[in-house]
């Protein structure tokens, strides 16, 4: 029997990606909550370079970095595939996942946490990136087509965390009139029963960010 | 017969990654040199989001971003595999490729082009990242083991471009005494006949950077 462990942190969108994929595939796993102020010796052993979560273990062999973990899980447990089988579609899924991860997420994050000129620049960048996503979702239920795929899972930050950050900070980024397709996608994504089950508590995340913001 | 085209730019390490993989696999392709000052309508059509090279076309379908292109090529043309077959080894190859691409390459680049405090910070970061790479290469000929794999191909920047940038700027980063395994890897990599064949001319790249530096 495969031994699967996940070292995580409550409320982390990166850890949530891995948890969602494990749940979508019905893989049983042991969850170990990490204290990022006092990092465990196991975390430092398994991820000496980044010293971050998630750390995923399969038969005691560690994998770090959420995108690498998700691709690995998808290759080992074939049911409910996260990536398309067709090589071209797979390349497109990876393209969108990285666009969301490196362009959108960082621009949204900086729109919330920076100030002045830097904030205006980040908001402009976020607006442009969100427009691209809105256009991509024009004729699609999910980035993955009819069901949740890699880019949707990476987009969890936009679907759940962004709204909390916007409300907490008073910075408005994603609105129905500007991004109707993206807003429909957010509603679809959050309405999936398996997503609902695995998301952290909104109130706890709100309070966490609020304390940090002040 | 498959139609393969590559839109590139002479001297780009990102384009070179794709060219090397095509050569390693013996895939015939048409090369189209782009002018990045006056971008062609085809480049803008195929890569409207980033408007960058490389753009790879297979049967008229475009793929952008060098890592996505390399993974696609490796899946379509199976000979001389770039990624390992084992899912765990594959995850490790992707981990090192991204570490080199996002941590080392940017730290080396900033060590050359920034000044003052920012430069010192970048040099420290580059030093730490290079030490990690040196350690990873302790008992290996290549990152991919006995032959060139994904991380080696991504590491082309360290093997070839870094040395030119160091010589041109006078900023010393990679030395034999600090990184003996990495220096041995650089020599091995540059000594591969297929690498030698496909690298751009050192003098041209040197002059290009020198003009930009001044």
Image (spheres, coloured by chain):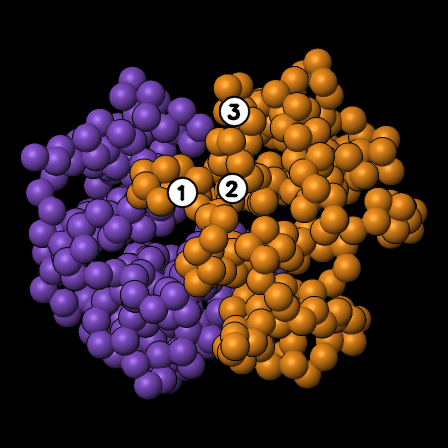
Chain colours: A orange, B purple
Q: Position of residue A188 (x, y in %)?
A: 66, 30
Question: Which of the image's four quarters has the C terminus of chain B?
Answer: top left
Q: Position of residue A61 (x, y in %)?
A: 50, 77
Could you tell which of marks 3 and 2 lies nearer the N-terminus? 3
Q: Is residue A55 visible?
A: no
Is B11 rendered above or below residue B161? Answer: above
Residues at marks 1 and 3, CA–CA distance in whole angstroms: 15 Å
Q: Cα distance, mark 3 to mark 2?
A: 12 Å
Which residue is depicted at the point 30% across and 81% down?
B140
Residues tagged by mark 1 and mark 2 found on one chain of the structure: yes
Which residue, given by chain and number where applicable, does mark 3 sit on? Answer: A140
Q: Which residue is mark 1?
A: A84
Q: Chain of mark 1?
A: A
Tell me if residue A15 comes above or below residue A42 in the rendering: above
Q: Who's the residue at 49% across and 36% down the image? A: A144
Both marks 1 and 3 on one chain: yes
In the picture, residue B94 is in which quadrant?
Answer: bottom left
> Quick one: label 1 or label 3, which is nearer the N terminus?
1
Q: Is residue A214 above or below residue B1?
A: below
Q: Is residue B51 above or below residue B18?
A: above
User: Looking at the image, which residue sits at the far top?
Assistant: A177
Residue B35 location in percent, x, y? 26, 28
Q: Chain of mark 3?
A: A
Mark 2 surroundings: few (<14), some (14-19) or many (≥20) residues within 10 A: many
Mark 1 touching mark 2, by CB under 8 A?
yes
Q: Nearer the viewer, residue A135 or B41?
A: A135
Give the secondary structure at mark 2.
Answer: loop
Contact check, label 1 and label 3, Cβ < 8 Å: no
Disc tally is 3
Residue found 32% across the figure and 41% down from its top: A86
Determine which quarter of the picture holds residue B80: bottom left
């Amino acid at each position: 029997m495969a031994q699967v462990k996940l070292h995580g942190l409550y409320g982390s969108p990166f850890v949530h990606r891995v948890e969602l994929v494990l749940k979508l595939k019905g893989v049983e796993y042991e969850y170990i909550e990490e204290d990022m102020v006092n990092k465990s010796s196991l975390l430092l052993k398994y991820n000496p370079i980044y010293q971050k979560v998630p750390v995923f273990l399969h038969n005691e062999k560690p994998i770090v970095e959420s995108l690498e973990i998700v691709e690995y899980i998808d290759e080992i447990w074939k049911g409910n595939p996260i990536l398309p089988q067709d090589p071209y579609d797979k390349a497109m899924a990876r393209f969108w996942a990285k666009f969301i991860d490196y362009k959108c997420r960082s621009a949204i994050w900086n729109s919330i946490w920076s100030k002045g000129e830097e904030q205006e620049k980040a908001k402009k960048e976020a607006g442009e990136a969100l427009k691209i996503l809105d256009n991509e979702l024009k004729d699609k239920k999910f980035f993955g087509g009819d069901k949740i795929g890699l880019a949707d899972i990476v987009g969890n930050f936009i679907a759940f965390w962004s709204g909390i950050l916007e409300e907490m900070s008073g910075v408005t980024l994603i609105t129905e009139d500007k991004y109707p397709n993206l807003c429909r996608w957010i509603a679809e994504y959050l309405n999936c029963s398996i997503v609902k089950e695995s998301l952290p508590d909104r109130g706890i995340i709100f309070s966490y960010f609020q304390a940090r913001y002040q």
